Image (spheres, coloured by chain):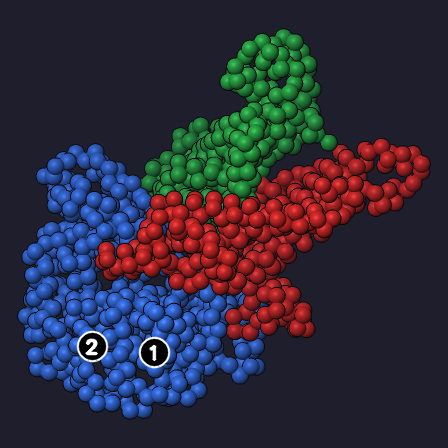
Amino acid sequence: MLTTTRRGVLAGGAAMLAGLAAQRQAEAQGRRILVIASNQDIPNFDPHVASGYSASMALRNTYDSLVRVEGNPPKPVPHLAQSWTVSDDGQEYTFKLDPAAKFHDGAPVTAEAVKYSFDRLLRLNRGNAWMIAGVVDQNSVEAVDATTVRVKLVKPFVPFLSVLPWVWIVNPAQVEANKGEDDGQTFLRSNLAGSGAFKLRRAEAGNLYEFERVANAWKQGGGNLTGAIWKITRETATQRLMVQRGEAQIAVDLTSEDMDALKGRAGVNLVIEPEYRTFSMKMNTRHGPLQDANLRRAIACAFNYQGMLDVAGYAELMRGPFPETIDGFDKDLPIYRTDLARAKEFLAKSSTPNGGIKLTVAHVSGLEQQRRWALVLLDSLRALNIELDIKPMIWPDMVSAARSPETTPDIFMVYQTANYGDPDNLAYAGYHSSRNGGWQNPVYSNPAIDKLLDDARGETDPEKRRELYVQFQRTLMEDSPDIFGVLEKRKLAMRNNVKGFTFTPVASNAIELFPLSLG
Amino acid sequence: MSSTTAHPRVEAWRRGLYRFRQSWVSVLGLLIVLVLLVLAIGGTSLTPYPQHIMGLVDTSARLQAPSTTYWFGTNEMGQDVFSLVVAGTRISLLAGMAVVIVGAVAGIIVGAVAGFFGGWVDEALMRISDLMLTVPGLILAMAVAAALGPGIFNMIFAIALSWWPGYARLVRGEVMAKREETFVLASRAMGAGTNRLLWKHILPNIMSPIIVKMSLDMGFATLTVASLGFIGIGVKPPTPEWGSLLSVARVNMPDYWWTAIFPGLAIFLAVFGFNLLGDGLRDLLDPKARR
Amino acid sequence: MVGYILRRLLLLVPVLLGLSMLVFAIARLLPGDPVALAAGPNATAADVASVAREFGLDKPLVVQYWNYLTGLFQGDWGVSIFTRRPVAEDLAAYLPATLELVLAAMLLAIGIGIPMGLMAAVFRNRWPDFISRTVSLGAISMPRFFLGLVFQLLFAMWLGWLPLSGRFPLTEDPPPAITGLLTVDALLSGQFHAFGVALSYLALPAIAMSLSPLATIMRMMRASTIEVLQQDYVLTERALGLSQRLILFKYVLKNAISATLTVIGLYFGWLLGGTVLVETVFDWPGIGLYATQAVLTQDFMPIIGVTLCIGAIFVTVNLVVDLLYGLLNPKVRYQ
């Protein structure tokens, strides 16, 4: 804002004072504490049960994994594993563990611990287990010696290293000592048994979690933080004001309007980067009027893409199922864009040439962006004489509605975040018929697509694999099962005294604390 | 109405009306409510941008400050806030009224049955309504509305679920008192059936306190409807409802304050109007309560 | 007297039992499928069934209620199906924040409402009466969530005088937990700076909460004062030439307050259930916020827990009010 009013100056001054006071207080206590404002609670600390980005943040800082993910584009880098080798057929991985690695209780992180953790993850079959399900089984992981782990994949899985940052290693001794009747789930829900650089200092469920640097952790170096607070702040406007006033150093759930309001403010840096988080509107291809491919194409052509982009702010339109930066993206893919004449042509070929029907769209209640896009869709469909019933649903209801074609709404809005930077992640979860009944792909099923995806999973020649994905995209576009929406940019706001942050487009809102400093 | 009771009652009305006119706050309340009723009946035709209420979005005119084109500014979809707020009157009034009517009807039935039959029926019904009174109504309504899914009827049902016990207790007390009065005893002696007694003789005689309570409740019902909308479990979009408009606009504060302030003021004004009017009506219909 | 109290306490048992039954029935008869969520996005039908078994949801409703009830007696309020945290622990963590908010709001309401009501009654039908009557109607009509937002806009966002939300600065450690009420704890441990800080966080939500009880107490106080002023004995005293002030304080105040007490009791319970909106606006970590989260995920154990907890407090507070009423009016006989 260029005009400076007296009130503005007063407010700014008072805010600065408040910020400074908080800062001084912390410094007086010799602590450098980073406050992160987020709207998601951390309901569970069990590394093999919890899911969601808040849990990823907690776990990646308190536990360690074999490899970390770093850079842009993201690459696996050594972590617990100092080095690794892959067999020629891509089915056998051998990891050498860092002999210095130790858990918080001083016990070394051994190959046995790695095996124990993989087995527990598979046994519980929750949390991130789906990432390795069908690829790793109870016999796959073998402790060759104290610091050597060998993993024999059940079938080839090219992106294996990309999922490893999300498989955390627990201290078997601690879990066994508190095993109970549920494999230690009660214990690990609120206790840590890891080797990470941070541990939990204070937990106030639904309000805040305070982390503290482990003094004698095996991994030294990194930034100068003595601690960090994950503050649950449900309103994005509040998150923004906290950063503006210096009460928080990082806010992770900001809207585009928030980013605009922060632009140019002294002391605030903005991170606006593309990330692998796609948004699409899935149409019910198995039940109701949208079984008709021509109607689906008509809708894809009638949709107001520019309007969608306008209300989304920092985002770019998707050109098919993949983000453009993902390996295997087809640059020449013919896509649908707003073209009412073409939409009416498709409509004329459908079983309801004059519209006159009513469709239902479901979105997650409380997700502001989805609400706005639903309104854009409603407005777009009026041009085809199609009514739209907007149903905001709570997430559990969305999940259970997705279980059968009959209960799935005509149009189903979903965000899908890639946990690893490989086309397989988005394509398999979103379009393979084995995922039917799950929210990522409630109904869409096409044997040709299934075959392409299965083949691509096991194809080790990068060129051939790319070709398979191009075919996949073409076939999919012909079928038009989705309105391919937008790729929202990751929007983070940060005080400028946060040092050492580098952006990685994989779960970047699950802030990794280790490299960060407060200056 | 029988001729024997007409005279004093007309007299009471006349006196009440005089008092009502004397109190300028009641008249103010009546004026506000009348304006709201006009807006509710007129609906979209009274708004400058009726298309926006139907769901037209204009993403090139997002979040514009109040001006002569857009009196209350535009929201994040580029829709005219003034049109949405005016259109919201119908929803909020209708929902508030429906809650009160459903609650009152259910309460009257329960209360009348309990009061007239007495004994274990009375005991059981009153224990249940006492229990309902201890349940936090808003949380119950939230839980029920969330489970049933969004929609105006679900919302009305959810709120009315905790609304009836007040009426049940009121009606029961009145019925019990009237049951022993001479004219009822007389009709009973003349062989009038239970139903006839209840509906023809007792209920018409206790309508005054019920109407007073209903008018006093209107404001609070409107407020509860807006509260559910504010939590995010209310009507379906794009239905413009004040609470949901305010809830959605929270993220726009402080820079785009107009998206939040005007729906909020509308809620306040409506509730205030009904409360003023209710207060005045109580003086009018229930002189005993006036002090 | 003691016998009366015991009898009243004994009567609480069936009330609470009935309450638990009612709340349990309503919560469990609602549609919705929280089990699917708890089982996770990639769960198979078998996984969902196993979660249902884990929480005993595959048994008949009566058995479920019986298990819940027997658990209650052992301090087990069930487990959240979503977070899998024990509800009792969560309630213990969230309740103090709500109590602090409600107590502060009630203190404000009583402290301002009683003198204002008295004033209105004494100056009946003159301008202080009209103003306070209109203002009180305005206060009742003001949606608390809207007032909270306006407060935030004015005092936190534009003027920057008071904190926007939360209970205490994040990077500071709160005073040692004794009662769980931060202001009280700060005073008890002699941390006056922390007291001031906690108070600055409490101010806006407490004021937003206090308005409608303030208005009701004021109106009630006005009405009962007028009633007492017209009683024979007061008229007699006045005729006997006692000063207005003496009459007011010696007789009227005491009698009027005891009538207002009932309203205070009712309101206390009502506010406990009504903090939801203010807590949402101010991110105040109390049971209202907890209940909202539970409602949005259809997590019924916390919903039942919160409802039952508030209901129990409501019933208890009203019992206490009844007893206090008796103390203030020895004419009321304990039968």
Q: Residue A212, percent across and down?
A: 45, 79
> Which mark, residue A176?
1
Q: What residue appears at the point 38 percent right and 88 percent down from the top-left corner?
A: A106
Q: Colour of chain C?
A: red
Left or right: residue C133 versus residue A355 is right
Quadrant of the image occupied by residue B151: top left
Q: What residue appears at the point 32 percent right and 91 percent down from the top-left corner?
A: A100
Q: For marks 2 and 1, give the CA distance.
A: 28 Å
Near-viewer residue (A324 or A113): A113
Quadrant of the image occupied by residue C134: top right
Chain with green colouring: B
Near-viewer residue (B47 or A371): A371
Q: What residue appears at the point 27 percent right and 56 percent down from the top-left corner?
A: C49
Q: Residue A127, percent across and down?
A: 29, 67
Amino acid on which the number 1 mark rests in the picture: Glu
Classify mark 2: helix, strand or loop. Answer: helix
Left or right: residue A31 versus residue A189 is right
On the rendered image, what quadrant is the C terminus of chain C found in? top right
Residue placed farthest to the bottom in the image? A99
Near-viewer residue (A141 or B82): A141
Residue C284 visible in image: no
Q: Residue A76, percent across and down?
A: 23, 79
Q: Residue B183, percent across and down?
A: 63, 14
Answer with mark 2 or mark 1, whichever residue precedes in sequence: 2
Amino acid on which the number 2 mark rests in the picture: Leu
Chain with blue colouring: A
> Which mark, residue A161?
2
Disc 1 residue crowd, few under 14, some 14–19, many 20+, Cα 10 Å = few
Q: Chain of mark 1?
A: A
